[in-house]
Image (spheres, rainbow, N blue to C red):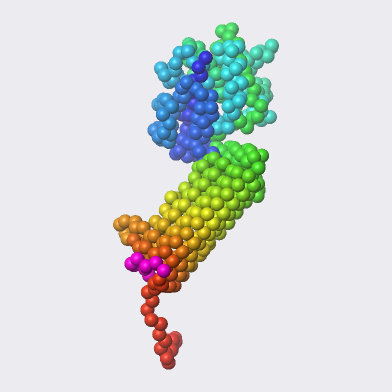
Amino acid sequence: MAVSVIILAAGQGKRMHSSLPKVLHQLAGRPLLSHVIATARQLNPEQIIVVYGHGGETVPKAFSAADITWIRQELQLGTGHAALQTLPYVKPGAMLLILSGDVPLVKTETLKRLLVMMDQGKVGLLTVDLPNPNGYGRIIRDRVGKVSKIIEEADASPEQRQIREVNTGITAIEARYLKQIVPNLSNNNAQGEYYLTDIIEYAATSGEKVAAVSAADPIEVMGINDRQQLAYLERVYQKREAARLMGEGVTLGDPNRFDLRGELVAGEDVFIDINVIIEGKVILGDGVKIGPHCYLRNAVLGKGVEVLANCVIEEATIDARARVGPFTRIRPETRLGEGVHIGNFVEIKKSTIRDNSKVNHLSYIGDTTIGKEVNIGAGTITCNYDGASKHRTIIEDGAFVGSDTQLVAPVKVGAGATIGAGTTITRDAPPGELTLSRAPQRSSPGWKRPSKK
């Protein structure tokens, strides 16, 4: 039977105390809902339907996926009411897997176990045993251990509240059966809402067997209702990712001080020091070393690259054996060749620097092409913006640019040229020659500095 996934994501999340819909709050750099959608896709479903409500169109606008059907729940009257909104869009012959948009760490393997159990009935649910079940709906079983209903905590008796097996909110049901049950749900409860969980009691009293699967790890079915729970699951996620990376051969200076907010592909003998943040997709070649307190986003670092402390690297490619930092910023559309050295307090933007060139101190290089074996002295600035447009600077192979130089683009420095320290270059500098623009130095004999009276 084909599987369709329904994700309930309409809730406000009052305890988040935020104008942002709860499912758009981020875990590991991605919205909670993004994690659930990614898990759903691993099941290769026929449909993915997301029911949204609070925050209006901000939820679907946060995603550009064409494989999702978005359904707006204008009034949030409970999970049963949310399921009701999906009925016109659900394919009749499908097996429906209903997930929660605020449960981001559920494993695909667990969901597959639930779907396999559906061979035994029309309805199934995922449960979990919790040492402290406060806030969760309790699983009520009959004398022979069959699930008979779910009772929400607000409606439970003191004895029922002692039950540790609880509902995770994850349900599987045949589409035809859902269409039969949902229109008959009642809101006669403490919250005045239509509970999707009532389908369990309906099925049991109708003689249908309810298939129940227990999650092995409570963490994977933990929902997020407040910022403390969000922070807790963030650390859980990061520890899992750290353990996975170390299992693949990456050395982490301290697994508790590492943040992966995207995808990291690492070669052998990679070392990552403390407080490094990885966002987007980052590829690290063999032997790469990342110093402490660095931020990398959508970057590719070749074999043997060393990044010293306190560097920012965004949307850039750095070739083998280059060295960057400390306190360096590499901005988007930058390419550093093999053996390039970029030093402290240097900013590189939208530039190409070819093999074995050096920009070691206190410089800004923007919209520039630098050839091989070039030395850029301390305090060099490429003046690439005239207030209206950006212009390009070209520095050819073997050039030597002295300290405190300003290159006013568009301008070219020829191969092997030398630019004297303190020079402002406004015209092309010929190859192989010394170019400088200094006022003559003079001294004034007998001059005295003014003094206060």
Q: Main secondary structure of the magenta part?
A: loop
- Judged left or right of residue 173, residue 165 is right
Residue occupying image coordinates x 51% and y 42%: 281
Q: Residue at x 55, y 59 (%)?
A: 326
- Residue 327 to residue 196: above or below: below
Q: Furthest-bottom residue in view? A: 446
Farthest residue to the front: give it: 432
* Relative image position of residue 104 (x, y in whole percent): 55, 32
Up the image or down, 229 lies above or below 415; here it is: above
Residue nearest the observer in this picture, 88 or 436: 436
Residue 85: give x, y in percent of width and height.
43, 20
Which segment is the magenta one? Answer: 424-432
Q: Nearer the viewer, residue 245 or 32?
A: 245
Give the image quarter of residue 159: top right
Q: Is residue 429 magenta?
A: yes
Query: Is any atom of residue 424 visible in this view?
Result: yes
Residue at position x 40%, y 58% from top? 368
Q: Position of residue 142 (x, y in %)?
A: 66, 13
**Residue visible at 44% across and 17% down?**
90
For the C terminus, which image quadrant? bottom left
* Left or right: residue 333 compared with residue 390: right
| Residue 102 in sight | no
Residue closer to the observer: 355 or 117 = 355
Residue 37 among magenta residues: no
- On screen, residue 17 versus residue 407, left or right, reads right
